[in-house]
Amino acid sequence: MGLGHGEIIQDITAGLAVGARTPAQINNGRTWSAKTFRRYLNQASQQKTGDVIDYQIRTSTDEAGVYDTHEIHASRNGLIYFTQQKHDRAGYIRPDGAIKLFEMPEGSHPHGIRLDQNNRLFITLEYQDKLAEIDPINGTILQEFDISFDDPSSEGVVGPHGLAIDEEGKLWYTGKSSDVIGWVNPANGEQKRFTLPTRANFGANFTHGILSNASGPIHVEIDQNGNAWFVNLLTSEIGRISGDGSIKFFEISGLASVDNTRPINVIPGPDGKIWVTVEGNNDASIPSDSLANKGGIARFDPITETFIGYQQSTSKGAGGAVGATKDSIWFQYQEKSLEELTIDQNGRQSQTSFALPEIGQRVMHRITRGPEGNMWFTSLMQDTVSVLTTDNVGIPVYSFRQEKSKGQYLSALPDEITGLQQDESGYNSQEGLFLSALKGRGSVPTHRYEDTLTGRHLWTIDRLGFETELFSPKEKGRYNYEGKDFRVYRTRDSADGLIPIYQAFNPRTGSIEWSDTRKDFSKRFQDVSIAWYAEPFPIDSSHF
């Protein structure tokens, strides 16, 4: 149990779960070379689609028989964050499997965890009725927000469980034990709370659990229009809080179920549709082979307010997430497998099942898409964070600017990424995440230059044009050589949330040039086309 003072220094004792394997570390923080990059690329390429690594996260002081690895959220900073509620811990795992744990206050039971668009990390302290901002590298609590009722002694506990962050930076939470939804604005401390109708069914709840006559809101997400969507575990419905503060509920249909479907996860899809995963009915009196005892996934159309259900039959359902491409939705059975749905505007087109290694009872809970395109997920009863290799896997390459030297540092190795994110490193202004697809041969080595007039970066496959007399005298010295990006693969044409990098032929230099903006680029050069896709870091709305 922790005191909230930051990272745990002691070693993690268990490491890999039974049958798991880990890639060897490469480069160990040294400056990139083409040889090192090829080694890293080859190592990652050896993993096949469907391969799973289970990382068990235990320490020598963990109480025997207590397991609870819960929420998970992959960030754009290359780290995958998770919470271990009963251990009073949070932490992160790097794509290479290295783990760091953060102590949270004793008895706080941290649950929801998210990063905002400025890479600030927030967490719910469910048993203390608080939200907190913590340092994303060492876990130190930076500030706390008390969201308890005005008179807890008579009104009970709130129980902030699920967490989501909207585009304005407001922190949305679900009050699992109180049937409330609320938000906090960390910029000024402003708060707002929405009370569900079922709160009138019960008095003050001090149990931190869900009462039988309650709704039990447990998960919340924000859609593309700023609406907050949440699921009620006990009332078989999803809810929407619109921008004007109005609440509307929609009863889940389309699934073969008896009484409550037990919705557990809501997923705003890339096309504006809302997906919801359900556990199934947990009533022990229902035969185990009944569909009513199984999980499922359904799609809700906010325009027609209708559901399409896809009943499942392997085991109870669990979390879900959008995949690496716009036509991909992933969800979990609690025990047996991960499922990928290929979707279009009409709903599910196909479904692929990925079996998991046998490590004992899993009880999977949440899933998230990692920065490298793989799917990461938690298993409550094994204290594991796991990763499944997808066919969209890529290597994240980050760029950092050294303010004193104005030099550029490019890194794809987790050791380097973590080190460069430390305040004392002297590097900041993390500028980009490039996803290099691992499969395919259409790759080219690239060189990066800064345009001193516009502040933008250019990439070229022929650096000589920037270093010879081909430019006019007025343009001499306009481009500063920033570094080499080694190899970029041009197969990421459908990845969600990426911005295009444009390619054009410069007739004066006789070379191909790349830019992250099309404005002016197409006026000066010929044959402008999209060369590959990049994810801005932090998100810059001017790109869209």
Image: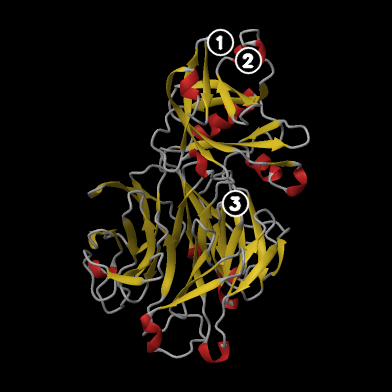
- Amino acid type of disc 2? Phe
- Amino acid type of disc 3? Asn
Callout 3 crowding tier (Cα within 10 Å): few <14, some 14–19, many ≥20:
few
Query: Dot 1 lies on which element?
Result: loop
| Residue carrying label 1 | 509
Q: Position of residue 263 (x, y in %)?
A: 34, 68
Mark found first going from the N terminus, 1 or 2 = 2
| Residue carrying label 2 | 466
From this view, report whether residue 75 is shown above or below residue 60.
above
Count of numbered tags: 3
Query: Dot 2 lies on which element?
Result: helix
Quadrant in which residue 383 is drawn: bottom right
Measure the alpha-carbon separation of dots 1 and 2. 8 Å
- Amino acid type of disc 1? Thr
Q: Residue at x 63, y 68 (%)?
A: 62
Whether the residues at callouts 3 and 1 have beta carbons within 8 Å, the answer is no
Measure the alpha-carbon separation of dots 3 and 2. 34 Å
Query: Dot 3 lies on which element?
Result: loop
Q: Residue furthest top?
A: 469
Residue nearer the viewer, 340 or 467: 467
From this view, report whether residue 62 is shown above or below residue 376.
below
Whether the residues at callouts 1 and 2 have beta carbons within 8 Å, the answer is yes
Quadrant in which residue 407 is drawn: top right
Would residue 521 appear left or right of 271 to someone viewing this image?
right
- Residue 467 visible, this orientation: no
Mark found first going from the N terminus, 3 or 2 = 3
- Residue 346 visible, this orientation: yes
The disc placed on residue 118 is 3
